[in-house]
Image (spheres, rainbow, N blue to C red):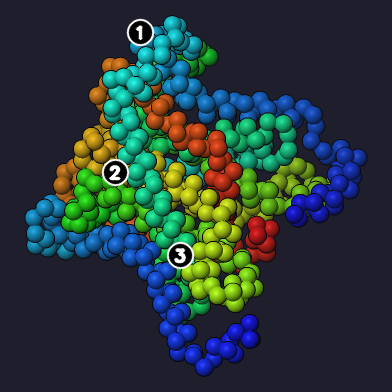
Amino acid sequence: MKTTASTARATSASLILRRIGKVARPGLGFVRYVILTVVAGFILMPILYAVLGGFKENGQLVGDPGSIIPSPWVVSNYTDVLFGDSAAFFWREAANSVIVAVVAVGLTVGLAALAAFVFARLMFRGREALYTLFTLGLLFPSAVAILPLYILVKQIGLEGNLLGVALPQAAFGLPLTIIILRPFFKSIPVELEDAAKIDGCGSFGFFWRVLLPLARPALATVSILAIVGTWNAFMLPLILLNGTDQWTLPLGVVNFSGLYSSDQARILAFTVCAITPAVVFYALAERQIVGGLTAGGVKG
Amino acid sequence: MSATSASVRPRVGSKRQTKWLTISLFLLPALALYVLFVLFPIVQAARYSLFDWNGLNPLTDFIGLKNYETAFNSDSFRRALANNALIIFLSLAIQIPFSLACAVLLNRRFPGRGLFRLIFFLPYVLSEAITGIVFSLLLQPGQLVDTGLQGVGLGGLVQDWLGDYTFVMITLFIIISWKYFGFHMIILLAGLQGIPREIEEAALIDGAGRWQAFRHVTLPLLGPTLRVSVFLSMIGALQLFDMIWVMTRGGPIDSSNTMAIDMFKRGFVEQQMGYGSALAVILFAFGLVLALAYQRFVLRRDVEGAVTAFNG
C-alpha cells in the first residue's frame, strides 16, 4: 500500500547513505543472528526439555539431567496419556476445554459482533457512554470480579457446570472483541448499506448477509484471540469447577503433576499433549493472532 | 440517500421505533452478559468488603472499613503490594527495553526473520499454569537449569530458585519475561514498522549517528506504541496469579505473594469472603488509577499527536 511509495523514495536516500558509509555493515548481520539465536534458544529450551523429557525414562530424567537426548527412547509415556492409563483423564479434560471454548467464543464473538454493529453504524443518545462502559472492562484486572462471581454462579445454580465457566469467560472477552470489531464495521461504506436497504434488507439482513461476510478476516482474528484466552484460562475454572470430571486442561495438568509427582516423565508427556493443540493452532493462525493483537494493542 | 429519507418521512415515528428496537435487540444480549458477569460482581465486591463474612452465612456482620484497615496492616498483603510493585518496576526497567531491542533487531528484512518472530511469540499462546509446571520441573535442585549453568561454568549462579526467600521473585520475573517479552516485542515491532524508514534516513543524512537517530527520531515516534506496551505490562503485573499459584502458592512464607494470590488465599481458601473482597476492591482501585492516569496523560497525547497518523 503506502510502503511502495516509501520504498521508492527511500532508495535515493539509501544511495546517499551508502555513499557516506552509513548502511548496515555485513558484520552487523552476523551479530544480529548470534543474538537472536541465543534468545530463540532460551525460548525453546523449556519446550524442548518437556518434549524430549516425555520420551525419557525417569531414571535418566532425574539421575542424569544434563543428557539432552533420550536414551533409550520410550514412547510409553505418551501412549499412556493418549491411549493408556491416563487417557481417560486426558481426553475428558480436552473435551471439557473444547466445550468451554466453543460456548464462550461463540457467545463472545456473536454478541460482540451485534453490539459492535450498533456502536459502529447507528447514531443514538448515550452511544459513546455505553461504548466506554464496555472499554472499561479492558482496563482493570479481571481477578477483581472473581470472588463475587463464585457466589453469583453458585446462586444461579451453575457451580460445577461448564456453562458456569463459559458464561463469565464470554463476558470477559466482550470488551476486546468489541474494540477490535467496531472500527472494522465502521470502515464498510454507507453506500453498501443503502444498496442493501433498497434491495429490501432490514438492519439484521444487512448485518447478516453483507457485514458479517465482509468482516470475515476481523471475525477470524477476534475468534482466535478469544480461543487462546479461553483455552488457557486457569483462575476462573479453578474456583468454579469442583470435580475431576469437569476440569479443563490447565487444571488437569496441574492436578496430574501433583498426583504423579514421582513420575516426571509422564508429567512432561501429559504437559506436551496438553499444549499441542495450542501450538498447532498458533502455527496455523500466527498471522491472525499477531495481526489482531497489534490492531488491538497499537490502536487502543 | 435523499430519496429514501423522503419516501420514509411520512412514517418517521415508526422508523424511530424500528431503530430503537434494532438497537435494543442487538445491544441488550451483550450488555446483559457484561453487566451480570463483569460489572455486577465488582459492585458486589465493594458491598461484601464492608462485612465480616465467610461467604455462606447471611450477610449481617457489617464492620465498615475494618477489612481495609486490616489489609493495610497485614504483613502478607504489604508483601503482596511490594511484590506487584517489584514486578512492575522490573518489567519496565528490563523486560520492555529487552523487547524493544529484539523488535529493533527484527525490524529489517533478512532470511529467517519470520521464524524468529514465530519462536519469540510462541510462549504467549501457552497456558500460564502449564508453563509454571514445566518450569517447576526444570528448576528443581540438580535439574536441567542447575546442570546447564554448571556445564557452562556458571555453577556459582545456582540458587534454590523457588525456595529462596529473596530470590524467588527474581526467578518468577525471569519466567514471566520468558512468557511475555514476545508479546511486547510484537506490539513494538508493529509500531516500528509504522514509522517510515526515510525519517530515520533523513536524520542519518543530516549527520546524526545511528544511536542518535534512534534515540531522538525513532524512539519519540514510537512513543504511543511504547506507552501502550507499558500500560498493558502494568495491568498484567497487577493481576499476576496463575503461574505463581502453580509454582509457589505465594511461598515460601508469603515471599512471592501478589495481590491476586492473597485475595484468592484469604477469600476462597480461608473463606474470609468479606476480607478477600476488600483486597479485590483495592486491586480494582489500583487498576482504575492506572487506567485514569493512562487516559489523562497518555491516551490524550496520542490522540492529539501527529504520530498516530502513521499507525492508521
Q: Dot 1 surroundings within 10 Å: few (below 14), some, or many (20 or more)?
A: few
Which of the two labelled residues, at mark 1 and mark 2, occupies the earlier sequence position?
1
Q: Can residue A128 be seen in this view?
A: yes
Q: Do the residues labelled 1 and 3 touch (CB within 8 Å)?
A: no
Q: How far apart are marks 1 and 2 (CA)?
A: 35 Å
Of marks 1 and 2, the one in the foreground: 2
Residue B98 in percent (x, y) is at: 57, 38
* Residue at mark 1: A59
Q: Position of residue A2 (x, y in %)?
A: 76, 55
Is residue B275 rendered to the left or right of residue B21? Answer: left
Q: Which image quadrant is residue A125 in?
A: bottom left
Which label number is shown at residue A114?
3
Q: In the rendered view of the protein, which quadrant contains the C terminus of chain B?
A: bottom right
Q: In this view, does A86 lie to the left or right of A49?
A: left
Q: How crowded is mark 2: few (under 14 residues within 10 Å), some or many (20 or more)?
A: many
The numbered mark, 3 or 2, whose residue comes first in the sequence reads 3
**Neighbour class for label 3 at 10 Å: few (<14), some, many (≥20)?**
many
| Percent x, y of residue B191 | 63, 50
Which of the 4 image quarters holds residue B241? Answer: top left
Which residue is rendered at x = 14% and y = 53% of the image? B55
**Which amino acid is tagged 2?**
Pro
Q: Which residue is found at the position 58% from the left and 35% from the top?
A: B118
Subunit ID for the residue under disc 3: A
Q: For the residues marked 3 and 2, what is the alpha-carbon distance in whole angstroms?
A: 27 Å
Q: What residue is pinned by disc 2?
A: A237
Q: Mark 2 lies on which chain?
A: A
Q: In this view, does B281 lie to the left or right of A120?
A: left
Name above or below for residue B237 compared with residue B13. above
A248 or B259: nearer the viewer: A248
Mark nearer the N terminus (1 vs 3)? 1
Nearer to us in this view, B247 or A94? A94
